[in-house]
Amino acid sequence: MTHAPIELNYQLQALALREPFAIAGYTFTEMQSLQLQLRSGPLQGRGEAAGVYYLQDRPADMPAQLEGLRSALREGLGREQLRLGMPASGARNALDAALWALEAQRAGRPVWQLAGLSAPRPLRTTFTLGAADPGRMAASAGAGLCAQALALKLKLTGETDLDIERVRAVR
């Protein structure tokens, strides 16, 4: 079966966080993101990447990684070729997700079925609390998603007395 060529579009976007997220040595107020779309005729696949800041995998660098793949995408670049030909990165992850979505639309089946997996279901997981005032961290730990988390991960700053207060308050 012949498919329409795949066209690549993307944009960089700064997504504001509801509140600052502090860790030792850095406070995040927004998340830089690459939003990626693939189109093949009427079908569309999407992917997104934030990268990993401490690995220098930045959304601002991702367009250059993607530009070299435009012609390969038009010629039918698939997920396996992508995996073998591009180093692991946020850009590859976003493109892989979009290729999965496009393939699922072409097949008329959800991605989880194409991957041979069970239907998705909610999972209890961990939740990370950014370093903040101990009272605020305690309130956050007992509310919303934190209250249902399997475990809490606390970000601390290296200020020993304050970090001890934070841990006590959350406990």
Image (spheres, rainbow, N blue to C red):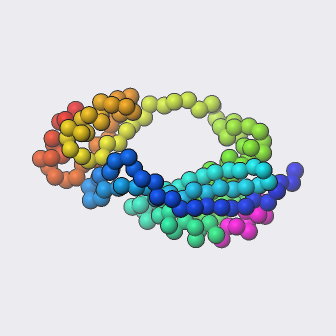
Query: In this picture, is 67 found above or below 115?
Result: below
Q: Position of residue 68 (x, y in %)?
A: 65, 71
Relative to 157, residue 115 above or below: above
Q: Is residue 93 visible?
A: no
**Left or right: residue 1 compared with residue 79:** right
Q: Residue at x 55, y 65 (%)?
A: 62
How many numbered markers are drawn? Answer: 0
Q: Is residue 121 visible?
A: yes
Which residue, as the protein is rendered here, is positioned at the far left? 161
Residue at x 48% of width, y 31% of height: 123
Is 60 contained in the magenta span? no
Q: Among all residues in the image, which is located at the extreme right?
A: 1
Residue at the spot 65% in from the left edge and 64% down from the top edge: 85
Magenta residues?
68-76
**Dividing the image into 4 quarters, which one contains the C terminus?**
top left
Given residues 145 and 122, the one toward you in this image is 145
Residue toward you, 24 or 132: 132
Residue 14 appears at what percent x and percent y? Answer: 46, 58
- Residue 75 relative to residue 126: left or right: right
* 45 or 76: nearer the viewer: 45
Q: Is residue 75 magenta?
A: yes
Q: Position of residue 168 (x, y in %)?
A: 17, 36
Residue 60 relative to residue 26: left or right: right
How far from the left and from the top, in percent, is residue 21?
Answer: 33, 50
**Which residue is at a point 53% across and 55% down the rendered structure image?**
49
